[in-house]
Amino acid sequence: AKKQGRGRWALFDVSMREAAIDALVMQNALKQALANDEFSVVYQPIYSTLTDEICGAEVLVRWLHPVLGPVSPDRFITVAEDIGVIHELGSWVMHKGCAELQRWKAAFPELELHLNVNVSGVELNRTGYVSQIKDILAQTGIDAHDLQVEITESVFLHQPETIAQVLEGIRELGVRIALDDFGTGYSALGYIDRYPIDAIKIDQSFVSRMMAYHRSDAIVRSILSLGRALNIDITAEGVETLPQLLRLREMECPFVQGFLLSRPVNAEKIMILLQCQKTK
Ligand code: C2E
Ligand code: CA
Ligand code: CA
Ligand code: CA
């Protein structure tokens, strides 16, 4: 195995480590993570294709455990949901993001910036969730219209009536609702027909296939025309190449997000990007 070189060893170590983190270890670690200050957040800018400028950012949580190392949210969010940690974590992320948005707005009052926060179905289902958002907005001084909650179609799988009420409540505050990972679920069209959806994020799987497959390109084009017909804002996620960006602009996709434009970065870096944009 030594002959395979250092890279291979590293890869092997990582997968071993990952496998070693069993559910119970992760659960116990997660329970203490907030108190131990192990979470942080990063922000991925969202760009307008009309102005080529940053018009907002999506806040993404990061977890660095002292022994387990960095754990991806794709792995720990569901565990956090199972053990109920998601409520405290979600509220911490939203509060942190809104406070940061307030700093950006204070530094660049001429910009219209918004913040996107991922919210899980478990959070929506908890009594008092709408007033929790209201409190965070009041505490951070953020205008409800500048906050967008991102939900996935999976939130509708359990207690759709409750979810519908909570979404109405969120919308009454003035907070906008975005449907994340659009196109990957089952009856996406039914949801935008029945629920108060303001925005759609086209899943990165379509964007990554778009240049190679005519069908994927046609699907993206159809989602965009649907968005225009229903007055729903569309963001294309996972834009990684220039041809993808140019094609999306050609199709008049209003918002784009992805590694080509910027990876998720810390709050200070967003401040710097906004500053660079101003002096450009
Ligand atoms: P998501 O909401 O679909 O977020 C987009 C994910 O794609 C992020 O991964 C982001 O880093 C990544 N990404 C962005 N641009 C590109 C690109 O151009 N190419 C590729 N390959 N990937 C890109 P991340 O941060 O690991 O988050 C994974 C998922 O974890 C998120 O998917 C979201 O569902 C969940 N998540 C993250 N933060 C939170 C949170 O605070 N609360 C909740 N409930 N879920 C969260
Ligand atoms: Ca998202
Ligand atoms: Ca997504
Ligand atoms: Ca996702």
Image (tube, rainbow, N blue to C red):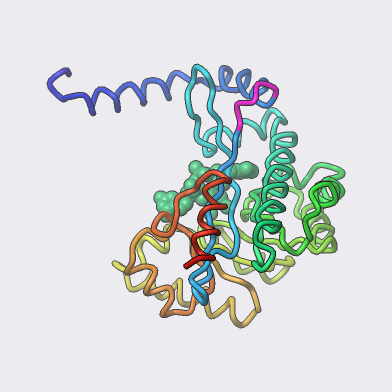
Q: Which residue shows up at 52% across the image and 39% down it?
A: 74
Does the segment drawn in magenta span residue 174?
A: no
Q: Which residues are magenta?
A: 35-39
**Residue 106 appears in which quarter of the rendering?**
bottom right
Tell whether position 36 is magenta. yes
Residue 40, position in %: x, y? 60, 35
**Against 54, is 2 above or below?**
above
At a point 21% along the width and 24% down the height, the residue shown is: 6
List x then y, in percent, for residue 63. Answer: 56, 31
Q: Is residue 8 above or below residue 126?
A: above
- Decide whether the magenta segment is chiefly helix, strand or loop: loop
All told, the count of numbered labels is 0
Quadrant location of residue 261? bottom left
Q: Residue furthest left?
A: 3
**At x 49% / y 20%, what residue is drawn?**
68
Q: Is residue 150 visible?
A: no
